[in-house]
Amino acid sequence: MNVLHFDESYLKRLAERDPATVEHFVSYFSHRLSSALRNSDLIQAEIDSVKQETFLRVWAAVREGSIQHPQGFGSYVQAVCQKVLQESGHLRPIKSEEGQNVGQELGLEEEMQRFQNGAMVRTVLEQLPERDRKIMRARFFEERESDDICLEFGVDRDYLRVLVDRAIKKFGEEYRKKSQ
């Protein structure tokens, strides 16, 4: 099963324990989580334990229907993994300059700033040329695999890197203009 992006249909099949979808989910994320966790100081048994707990929590959320943005499913799985790492004591909370844990409940002012930044990101994305916008969405929001993006745009991996770099540069330029 080759999924270009996650959608409601995928999550529904996962919740219903469709064998092909479950197999895809486990192989797709097992590989990604293992790669990310190998960069930590965990031994293989701890890596397996973190992955298993991550999968259990994600499956529970899928079955409960609590994932509201299927297109961000990849980011959700990674965030759950980070939470499991933190709870297990393998990931220490990052402290801000004021000594507060980053990610603590935000005050109203910080929450408004985050919302405004998100709105500006959406505005800037919409102003990019169509190709750049599609590449940025596929790469960073839908978290699609490079091979899938290459197929869609008819380019090889090396040229995809060039296109992504150009799109990021254009986005950065436009974002800076808007924020001044």
Image (cartoon, rainbow, N blue to C red):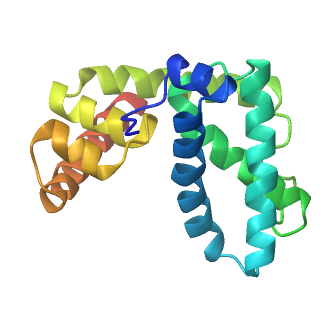
Q: Is residue 64 above or below residue 87?
A: above
Q: Is residue 47 visible?
A: yes
Q: Is residue 134 above or below residue 173?
A: above
**In terms of image quadrants, where is residue 64?**
top right
Q: Is residue 146 above or below residue 49?
A: above
Q: Residue at x 61, y 60 (%)?
A: 33
**In terms of image quadrants, where is residue 52?**
bottom right
Please name whichever residue, 118 or 17, is drawn nearer the observer in this view of the structure.
17
Q: Residue at x 19, y 47 (%)?
A: 150
Q: Position of residue 141 (x, y in %)?
A: 44, 35
Please name whichever residue, 114 or 15, is drawn nearer the observer in this view of the structure.
15
Q: Is residue 125 above or below residue 25?
A: above
Left or right: residue 83 versus residue 176 is right
Q: Residue furthest front?
A: 19
Please name whichever residue, 108 or 159, is drawn nearer the observer in this view of the structure.
159
Q: Position of residue 167 (x, y in %)?
A: 23, 43
**In terms of image quadrants, where is residue 97?**
bottom right
Total marks shown come to 0
Q: Residue at x 54, y 17 (%)?
A: 8
Q: Position of residue 84 (x, y in %)?
A: 82, 54
Q: Residue at x 73, y 52 (%)?
A: 81
Image quadrant in which the N terminus is located: top left
Q: Is residue 99 visible?
A: no
Q: Position of residue 135 (x, y in %)?
A: 26, 37
Image quadrant in which the C terminus is located: top left
